[in-house]
Structure formats: C-alpha cells, structure tokens
Image: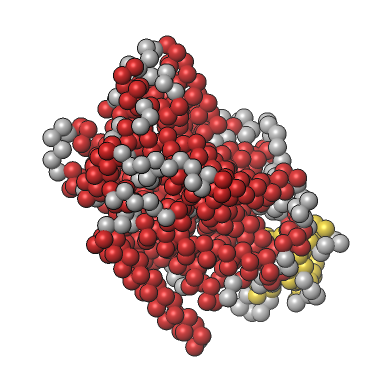
Amino acid sequence: MLAETTINIGTIIAILVYVLLVGYLGWLGFRNTKTATDFLVAGRKTHPFVMALSYGSTFISTSAIVGFGGAAGLFGMSLLWLTMLNIFVGIFIAFVVFGGRTRAMGHHLDAHTFPEFLGRRYQSKFIQVFAGIVIFLFMPLYAAAVLIGGAEFIATQFTISYETALLIFTLITAAYVVTGGLKGVMYTDALQGAIMFIGMTILIVWAYIKVGGILPSHQALTDMAGLVPGKLRDMGHQGWTSMPLFGWGDKKYDLWWTVVTTITMGVGIGVLAQPQLIVRFMTVKSQRELNRAVPIGGVFILMMTGVAFTVGALSNVYFNKYGAPLNGRVSKVIDEQKSFAVLQITKKDDTGNWVDVEGKMAPVRLTGDSVGAIVSAGQTVPVVQGRSISIIYAQGNVSQIIPLYVTSAMPKWFGIIFLLTLLSAAMSTLSSQFHTIGAGIGRDIYEQLQPKHGGTLGITRIGIIIGIIIAVLWSYFWQKSPIIIARATAIFFGLCASAFLPAFIGGLFSKRMTKQAAIWSMIVGFAVTSFWLLFVKAQEAGDIGLVQKITGGKTSILAGYPNWPTVDPLVVALPISILVAIIVCLATKPPSKEHIDKCFRRK
Amino acid sequence: MLGLQDKWVALAYILCIASTLLCVVYGIFAWNKGQTDVSQEDMRWAKEEKKAEKKM
C-alpha cells in the first residue's frame, strides 16, 4: 500500500514536471519564436536531430505503440514488414525522393497546407476544398486511434475505468493543444521525441533480457505456435514468428489479407500521402536538412514501431512464463510433450466447489499438479493450472496487451517513463492532427468558399473543437471494436493513399499530369474506399451497419466469397485511382507550359 | 533463422535493420549535399506561413 502511494505521488510529480517542462518549452517557443518557420525566416538551419525527432514524434503515436504493438501481440512478428515500410518508405523514400521536391514546389506555389499544395499545383479550387473536407471528416478517426491508445494505458496503469482515463487523457492533451501545441514548436516536439526514444529503448532491452536474450526469446516464441487459439488458426495464424497462411478463396487465408493489406500496406504506403507530415517538408531550409534527418529518423522509427511490434509479440513468451496461473480442467490436449492444452477455465463458487466459467477457454502451457477436482459430464476430473498467451490475459482486448505487459513485466518506475512516452507520442501527433484539421476547415474550405476571408480564426477554432469532440466520441463508442486502433489508423492512411497519392505523385513528378486526371483520381479513390468500407470490408461495414439492412443481416455484400470481406480498400481503390489518373491524363489537354514552368522551375 | 520459424518473418526482421542502416549510410554520405541558399521566394513563403500560424 505504501509502495503504491509512493508510486502514485511519484507519478503525479513526474507528470507535473513533464507538463511544466513542455509548457516552458512552448512558452520559450512562443516568446523566442522557435517554430520551424522561424528558423526559415531567420535563414538559420534546423538542427537535424530536432528536425528528425520532431517529424518522428509526429509520425509515431500511441496508435503505433499501443494499437499496432497490441496487434503484434495477437498476430505476431509478421507485423515487422510494417516497420520495414515505416523506415524505408516513411523515412527514406519520403525524405530523399519526396521531401526536396515537395519543399521546392510548395514554395514556388506558395502553398501552406497539403490541400492547398494540390489545389495550386492543379489550379483547382475544387481539389483544395475536396481534400480539405476529406481531411476534416476523417482525420478525427485517426485522432481517436491515438486517444484510445493513451486512455487504455492510463486505465491499466492506474486501475481506473476506460471512460475516466479517456476523459483525463483528453483534458491533458486538449489543454496542451489549445495552449500552444498547435504552433508545433520544434524543441517541444524534439523533447517529446527524445522521451519516446528513451522509453522505447528501455522497453526493448528489458523485454529481451526478461525472456532470455534475443535468439532464445525468438525461439521460445516460435515454440509456442501450438498455443494459437483455434479461431485464429482457422483464419490462417501459424504462430507468432510465421507469416499467416497465404492463398485465396478460403477462410483460412483471411488473416494474411488482414495483416498484409490492412495493417502493413495501408499504413506503410499511406504515410506518403499524410497531410500533416507532407507540410513538414516545406518548413526546412534545403534538401541538406532533409538528408541529415534521414539517419536519425531511420533509427528513431526502428526504435518505435520495431520495438513496439517485437515487444508486443514477445509479450506472449513473458505471459506464458510468468503470467498468473489460470485454473481449469483440460478440455483438449494440444501437445503432450510441450504440456500444451486447452483449458476450460474454472473458478470456486460460494460453497468452495470448482465450477466452469461459461464459455471461457484458454490455450495454456500446463504448469503443475492439480489444485482440486471438478465434476464434468458425470466424471471427476482434476483442476489444473496453466499459463496462457497475451490476448487471454488482456481479456480479448488487443489494445490492452502492451499496457498489461508494461504494468506486469516492467518495474514500477518504468510505468512513469512509459506514461510520459505515451503522453509525448500522443501530444505531438494530436497537435499536428488538430493543426491540420483547423487548417483544413479554415484555410482550405472556408477561405476558398468565402472570398472575403472574414472570420477565419473563429471558423478554424470551431473546426478544431468539433474535431476534438468527434475524436472523443469515436474513442468512447468504438473502443470495444476488435483491433480498433490499428483499423482506424489504417482506414485514414489507406483513404489518404487512395484519394491523394496519384494526384500528389503525379503533381510532383509529371509535367503531363492534368487537373482533370487529379480530380477524377481523387473522387474515384475516395468513392471506391467509401464503398468498400460501407459494403464490403466486413469489420468496418459490420460496425457501420448499413450493409446489414440491405442484405438482411450479412456484414458484407461479398460475404459468400471468402477473403474478399477481409481485403483492405487500399488494394482495390489505389490501383483504380492510379488507372483513372493515367487514362484521364492521356485523354485531356496538358497544363499550360507557363504553369508547369512555375511549378518545376529551379532556382 | 534468428530463432524465427518463417524465413519471411526473418527477412522482415533483417530488412528493418538493413533499412535503418541504409538511412544511416545515406545520411553520412549526403550530410553536406543539397545545401541551397534561402531565396526571396523561400522568405516570402515563410512570412506567409507565420501569418497562417498566427491564425491557429
């Protein structure tokens, strides 16, 4: 009790110190003008560490650490393909191939938001307003994923309800955002990035040491393949160090399509069309600053998603070795040699007799002798103990795996560091998300539709408040939906890729790309993604509920065709959007030479 | 390989580290490349950006 009180006081002091430090840096930034733009105005170079950590802390949020880390706890290390894409596409390709061009063209066109960039590149007010609307409507979904990730950890760490944790987390981050976080002060972002780096470094070192080192822990995880729950096995889960079963036309391939198309490709490719990240390229002084940020960014992302996904998967080894023993009767022997079995979970009733807990089964490694006996189907059978896997201890809630691991496996003091890590991850990402939402509603929608521009400030603020409210409501109502954090993030990233990527890449690299091609690729990309989410992708369509009304209860119009309901919209929408861009581009008149010269000119 | 059952997962593990090394090596070689002076256009952009920041 005393220790708990000490921890609570320590935690409160740590949070206060952190909030004061962030507030102080924000105030310094406000007073001394230290946003990225100020560096540019002053003609000074941004320190590469500051630039890279600032970008990285915006890119990586509680969604990646808690949401995708938890998904790795369920699906395994196959998620490392996403880390590979995060580093190679999200850092290397983004900085080396896209960054410099985006910066140059953005300055030529005097564009300050992503929708404005597209609108001016294609001389189309429609494009700017359309992109602004898409961002305003769907960015809160991504913000909700960030909020859920933070709230889940606070709920576990302080053993309070999710609703209370969500309220606390929202108030802290909203206070930060409203009191200056939106300015994107680079030193604050960098401090948050540094805290995240330290937190995740401790996490991975501890995790590997705790379960016996790098190779032995991988081997231990490999040896646990027999404990994959039946439902996941039926979907193609082959173990935490294997890819899901690949193929087409059978439910046993469903997991491969979820892991590869939704979790890996959606976010891995979608990062290139993230509005809040693209604008960062415009604030640097030259390509040299981008080049210098590449190595730091690469290492940073490896230590964020690489660590979260590895620790998420390895949490299974930890719980299987050190988790609280579960009591139950053996329902099925999986592997006698390894003592793997499926337990029907039991508990003692008021009279002290063992009884089954209705519908609660768990794959376990049996750990010892019987602790009692139970009468089942007329026979007396022993009640035994066993240790299970992460998702069982998280009671089926994927978002709980990382918080539960941290509170169970890590020392108490680390809980404070991890809380600060998550606060940092959430604040830096949320501030840029709400900045983008505000700019979307103010500059990209209102100012384009209202030529006199009066009252933009008020509209921007109202837009941000609406965005925060929508994000909180989504976090409140959708928290229980399976792997919701990863899915919500993937929806936004995939939507951005399908709606914006062909127009963005075409605009950056092709002088032939036309306004009509950009408009139609955006509309088609958005429409196909929306259709797929509403009517085909079973989890999303099922949550929305429209398809059930049309089909009389089915969660997908392709419910009778295996694998289709698990395919991510990106796989269908992006190729169609690219195809539309190419066809319309070839069928329409090229833009004027004068405009193209303006876009592509060298200094 | 590396204690991992599937070679595709082992490849992902290795490629994560390889991609990071690529970033590091690229950064070392390109550390001083791509420097350009701040132009009038850049300054104009930055001043407009400051105005936009104020609206936030």
Vertical order, A82 against A2 (above or below): above
Instruction: Where is residue A204? Give x, y as percent.
Output: 61, 63
User: Where A90 sits versus A525, above or below?
Assistant: below
Residue ID at (27%, 42%): B43
Is residue A283 visible in the rendered image? The answer is yes
Residue pictured at 61% horizontal, 71% vertical:
A409
Q: How many marks?
A: 0
Is A248 on the left-hand or right-hand side of A191?
Answer: right
Residue A143 at x, y percent in the picture: 40, 51
Residue A535 lies, in percent from the top left, at 48, 32
Residue A524 in the image: above or below residue B6: above
A309 is higher (above) or lower (below) than A264: below
Relative placement, left or right, of B3 versus A474 is right
Q: Quadrant of residue A562?
A: top right
Depth check: A46 or B50 in front?
A46
Residue A231 can be seen in this image: no
Q: Nearer the viewer, residue A387 or A415?
A: A415
Observer-nearest of A90 and A555: A90
| Furthest residue toward right | A337
Q: Residue at x 79, y 74 (%)?
A: A368
Near-viewer residue (B35 or A91): B35
